[in-house]
Image (tube, rainbow, N blue to C red):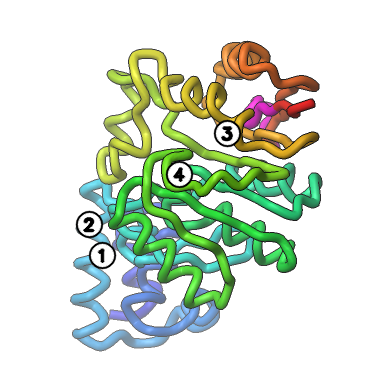
Amino acid sequence: MTVQEALDTSGIEPREARLLLAAAAGFSEAAVVAFPERALSSEVESAFLQYIEKRKRGEPVAYILGRKEFYGLELAVNPAVLIPRPETELLVELALQKNPARVLDLGTGCGAVALAIKRHRPQARVVAVESDLAALLVARRNAQKLNLEVEMRHGRWFEPLDGSRFDLIVSNPPYVAAGDPHLAELRFEPAGALVSGSDGLDAIREIAREAPAHLAPGGWLLLEHGMGQDAAVRELLQLAGLGEVASWPDLAGIARVSGGKIE
């Protein structure tokens, strides 16, 4: 079987097929495109078919490959962590605009947001908190691999902190409502990092309520949330006493991040 024959018979989306074949063969995606006539060994064919079967069962490509790119970083991922999404890059963009010296990332997962901020603000102190130990181990491995010094803390939200105050608190918390039909599509990802109460806002309520006590004067809280939740999140931020409350859209024009400033 040639590269082209393998791609043509895969039965999955072409880009995904190229990524999986490249991984199975041990060469780059560019080489897959450049040499369609290359013959594949039986070992490569077998590995590729195993990948294809996993993908057809719904397993995300990122979990099959064990990696995902986010904001220019290649991050290790596994089913203990959410797969970083392109829309979360908006949270990083907004964080970098604040040019903070002290940053807290709540619910860091694989470390994507904290590590992206640290890469672009190397002088900043970045603390990342995660309640799931398996996820925190993934974040620690990513930090080590990328040689980025982020302080990793195990615990729920603000619990493992030592009283420090931050110029910026960021979080991509769980925000999917229990029973949301979209959860079926996300069945391979950790439910605890997705679901947050009957309206999806339980984690955001808790973070918004407690954040002011951990913000330095003039500090900001920025929260990623779901489509259509922006008005409710802005109200929660205002109830917490934050000012300059606003929401920001992603590239599709959907409000994905809301935030406010402590006076």
User: Total label count?
Assistant: 4
Magenta-colored span: 251-259
Crowd band around label 4 with a 10 angstrom C-alpha radius: few (<14), some (14–19), many (20+) = many
Mark 1 or mark 4: which comes first in sequence?
1
- Kindly identify the amino acid type of the residue bearing the numbered disc 4: Gly
Residue position marked by numbered label 1 in the rendering: 51
Q: Amino acid at mark 1?
A: Tyr
Q: Secondary structure at mark 3?
A: strand
Q: Is residue 40 left or right of residue 67?
A: left
- What separation in Å lies between label 2 and label 1 (alpha carbons)? 5 Å
Dot 1: few (<14), some (14–19), or many (≥20) neighbours within 10 Å?
many
Between the residue at mark 4 and the residue at mark 3, the CA separation in whole angstroms equals: 11 Å
User: Which residue lies at the image location 77% right of the left edge and 20% below the top edge?
Assistant: 243
The local crowd at label 2, few if under 14, some if 14 to 19, many if 20 or more residues have their Cα within 10 Å, is: some
Residue that numbered label 4 is attached to: 107
Q: Quadrant of residue 236?
A: top right
From what the image shows, is residue 27 above or below residue 108?
A: below
Nearer to me, 6 or 109: 109
Instruction: Label 2, secondary structure: give it.
Output: helix
Horizontal side, residue 5 vs residue 170: left or right: left
Q: Are marks 2 and 1 in contact (CB under 8 Å)?
A: yes
Question: Which residue carries the number 2 mark?
Answer: 54
Q: Amino acid at mark 3?
A: Glu
Q: Answer with mark 4 or mark 3, whichever residue precedes in sequence.
A: 4
Disc ID at residue 224: 3
Q: At 48% from the left edge and 39% from the top edge, which residue is drawn? A: 158
- Label placed on residue 191: none
The residue most toward the front is: 163
Front of the two marks 4 and 3: 4
